[in-house]
Image (cartoon, rainbow, N blue to C red):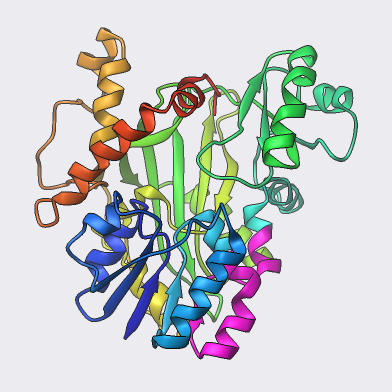
Amino acid sequence: MNILLLDGHTVQVLPMLEYLNKKNHITIFAEEKLSFGWASKYPNKKILCPKLIENEEKYIYFLRDYLSNNSIDVIVPLFNDSAELMSKIKSSIEAEFKTKIAIPHYETLIKGHDKNLTMKIAKDINIPHPKTFDLEDGTLEAAAKYCGFPSLIKPNIGAGAKGITRVNSLEELKNEYPSIKNNFGNCTLQEFISQEGFQYKCQLFRDKDGLIKGQTVQKKYRYFPISGGSTSCSEIVIIPEIIEYSNNFLNEVNWRGFADFDYIHDINDNKYKLMEINPRLPASIKSSFKAGVDFSDLIINDAIDNNTTVYKSKNGIWLRYLSLEVLWFIFSKNTDRFNSKPSWFNFFNSKTYYIDGSLQDPLPMITGFLIGIKKYLNPSFRKAKLKNKGK
């Protein structure tokens, strides 16, 4: 089968390549050569494509031209921008090129992609969540009164914590909000949940018949930036409430395909609270594969309307993001470096894997360090990442 993976420059492409290359011909679109997918040994074909965020029309033209000259059975978007775009043009592309796009239609996808819509649905079906106020639906004073302080300004649509800013007073809200809206679009104000509780990810696959065929929960232990950023160390666990809430949401919106949920444990009321949903594979998806849930198999077979296998997750699988773990160590206090649980120094055992590569495919890990150095040499990126956003 011929499969096209979009966003081949992202780290989440790596487990998809590792598992799909055994039975399929895999092509990746990558926006730059200094990237995870380009460094991997697994793609059969690597295509340098335009940057979607810079020119959507050019990207669509490039994709259509490629599909006109190459037979592709399934297209899988791996990041937010491509997931949203592919959901919008799904019907036309599938009809014209006889290919399948493994993403829900836009009217469904937006319910899990727009944070404001997500929280409204969570409220309707009694999924615990932080107090959330649509900043387009009232005054800043009303939002402040409802959510209280501290709170987070969150762009309704976005990825990687971009634009998320903690505010501690009405004055800060008034000062910060205009520029965030100008740069990122419509926003919500959301109650800040104390970071003392652990954060979790829940990944599920709901097939064409409305059945959950794979599910995992990841418990996050370390992040970079330390105040709240990308996960650098996590473990596969079982939290029945989180799985139930996530399943209920997918059933409510009649979701078909993969979805990734973010939760935080609020120690004040002992509830797991839904923070957001990603309509695509997260960077930490590799631990799900290693825990026995082959989401790549589910994604491809469901896209072509084949019956899908039920996968069971095993616990105790650890995932580390080596380049971010190194940064975590550098920026942490000594007491955290040497007393963290799990130990930062436990690098090698049969249940620990790395997001950014493996002994079987080592070049992406080296590339990951180079990408990190390149990013942090950019002053604006460094300032944005190291700013305390309190996510």
Instruction: Please state, as top left, top right, bottom left or bottom right, where the N terminus lies in the image.
Output: bottom left
| Lateral position of residue 99 relative to residue 350, left or right | right
Rendered residue at 42%/73% (across/down): 299
Residue 319, quarter of the rendered image: top left
Residue 137 position, x and y percent, is 88, 40
Q: Does the magenta stretch include residue 342?
A: no
The residues colored magenta run 85-110
Rendered residue at 52%/35% (across/down): 264
Rendered residue at 40%/56% (across/down): 31
Relative height, residue 39 to residue 107 (above, below): above
Instruction: Please state, as top left, top right, bottom left or bottom right, where the C terminus lies in the image.
Output: top right
- In depth, the one of 213 and 94 nearer the eye is 94
Rendered residue at 42%/87% (across/down): 69
Residue 240 position, x and y percent, is 46, 50
Residue 165 position, x and y percent, is 62, 26
- In depth, the one of 211 and 226 nearer the eye is 226
Relative height, residue 30 to residue 328 (above, below): below
